Amino acid sequence: MNSLSRILLVDDSPRDTELALEALETHSLANEVVTLRDGAEALDYLFRRGPFADRTNGQPAVMLLDLKMPKVDGLEVLRQIKSDPVLKTIPVVVMTSSREEQDLVRSYELGVNAYVVKPVKFGAFVEAVKQVGAFWAILNEPPVRTTPRPPRPQS
Amino acid sequence: MNLKHSTSWRTGFTAALAVLCLVAWLNWRHTHRMQATAERVAHTHRVQAALNRLFSLVKDIEAGARGFVITGDPHFLAPHEDGLRAVASQQRELAAAILDAEQKANLSELERLMAARIAAAQRNVELRRSRGFEAAREHMLQGEGKALMDRIRAQFARMDVREQALLDERSAAAARETATVRRLTVAGTLLSLLLLAGVFALLVRENRLRARSEREVQELNDRLQRRATQLQDANKELEAFSYSVSHDLRAPLRHVQGYVELLTNSLDGQLSGKSRRYLQTISAAGLEMGQLIDDLLAFSRMGRAEMMEMEVDLSLLVAEIRQDLELPEAGRNIQWSIAPLPVVKGDPAMLRQVFANLLSNAVKYTRRRDPAVIRIGVEPGVNGEVTLSIHDNGAGFDMQYVHKLFGVFQRLHRAEEFEGTGIGLATVRRIISRHGGRIWAEGVPGRGATFHLTLRPVAQPEASAMNASS
């Protein structure tokens, strides 16, 4: 098994989170998944604020981001990340129920790296999570990191 | 109503103008006539003066002759001889001045009398010279000189009276005409003033009407504006609603699906066949609902979305859709027959939806045919449109229910025969009608169905050549 990087999962629905984690687990991609329950938490995490002020590890390999969330929605999180000189290199995959064109267009305008509509069928959902996770967390070579990375777990 | 008013004020204005022109013309003509009358008065005076001068000449001729007869002194003959020299030209002058027929007759009688009187006077002078006073006296006494002179005097008086009568007649005619013109001028001016007052009243009224209708139009505009704003708001709400449906309705469905799957996996081995079927049914029902939501959202989007107008190559579009459709149908024997399709004007995404729906229907309803035959044809339509037809040899439908075919949630087949939500054709019709086209269908149960639709082609030289040759 390859070494795994950290995946950030931002979704306000605990069910969706559980299902996503199940899917990642099915494909042994869930070594290190940080789950955050809304956009505000995601921003706190990334900018090391509030409860995450003491976070010392580096930035995640990929962020899976829901769009419709309370407090700060996914598009706002995306906007802030992509306008930050350091954070903008984090690949962001929007994973949402919305098939609405406006969301799609807006996400790409803000610089999203991929846009995935969560399929209703669980099998397809698992497949989508697997592909996204495998591509961004394993295959994709991230840019040189500015903050220290945790040691890679050995399998 | 407005039209009637505007024509009547125009008519009134034209009439007033015409009356004023007539009055002006009458006055102008009258001025000319008055000038002519003044000339005639002067002329009459000239004729009277000429008559007087002529009468003086006759008297001079007669008096000169008489003075010479009495005295024998040739000095007395001077007025006689002067008169004789001048009388002819004076007569010509008078003849030229006289125009009236009666006066001309009078003049010739006068000339005749004058000639006789002058001849008598000359005879007296001759007798006095040749035979002396007595012979001349004798001739004067027995001669008719005096009687002639009386008639000449009477003739002059007659002519003078006649000339005066002519003048009076002409003056009276002129005075009558002056009165008439004055009356006409007053009447015409009054009439045109009345007409103009009427026109003014009409214009004032029309202005008021116009102002009122302008106010009404403004009010209607305002109402329309408010209505448009309301519609815009409603549309925004609908947008938000459909967004919410899209997002929030799908999420719990996905959860149901997911957890059913997780449950199935975790109970793997312990599940009875019955329980497994239950779980499969839950899952299938969820999937159906998901499809329904997707189709409904697409249907609603097709009604609201802004339409692009681009050139869409239907041949390319259909080829792409056919590829997508054939992938999951591998192993089936489908015979496609697709005519060269035109480039049409329309929204590419919407037209893709149309052909994806119609062709996937064709593929779906021919599921039990071997071979399945799907034909796409093109015919030139009316008004420069093209008619496309999509024919299949599938399950077909009963023409009795054709009116239900394009309704939302209307299905002509049971779900266990052919799956579907009953929204696809409603969406297709909505898109085609937004493109200004029509769609209709024919079917025979068990034999197949044909869908016809019209679209506007992009004018192409090849296309028109093709049309011309066909």
Image (cartoon, grey):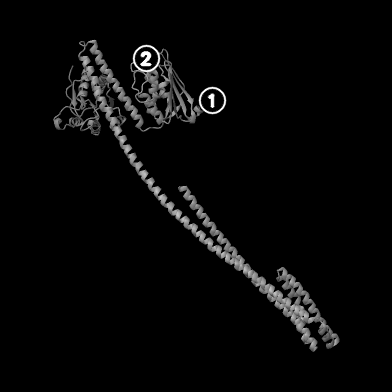
The chain carrying label 2 is B
| Residue type at the position of mark 1 | Ser
Residue B113 placed where, x, y %?
A: 78, 76
Disc 1 on helix, strand or loop? helix
Residue A131 placed where, x, y %?
A: 27, 20
Residue A1 visible in rendering: no
Q: CA distance from mark 1 to mark 2?
A: 39 Å
The chain carrying label 1 is B
Locate residue B132: give its quadrant.
bottom right
Residue at (60, 68) in percent of width and height: B175
Residues at circles 1 and 2 in contact by the CB criterion of under 8 Å: no
Residue B158 numbered mark, or none: none
The residue closer to the viewer here, B205 or B366, is B205
Position of residue B194 in the picture relative to residue B179 (left or right) = left
Q: Which residue is mark 1?
A: B469
Position of residue B433 in the picture relative to residue B127 (left or right) = left
Locate residue B419: give its quadrant.
top left
Disc 2 on helix, strand or loop? loop
Residue B330 numbered mark, or none: 2
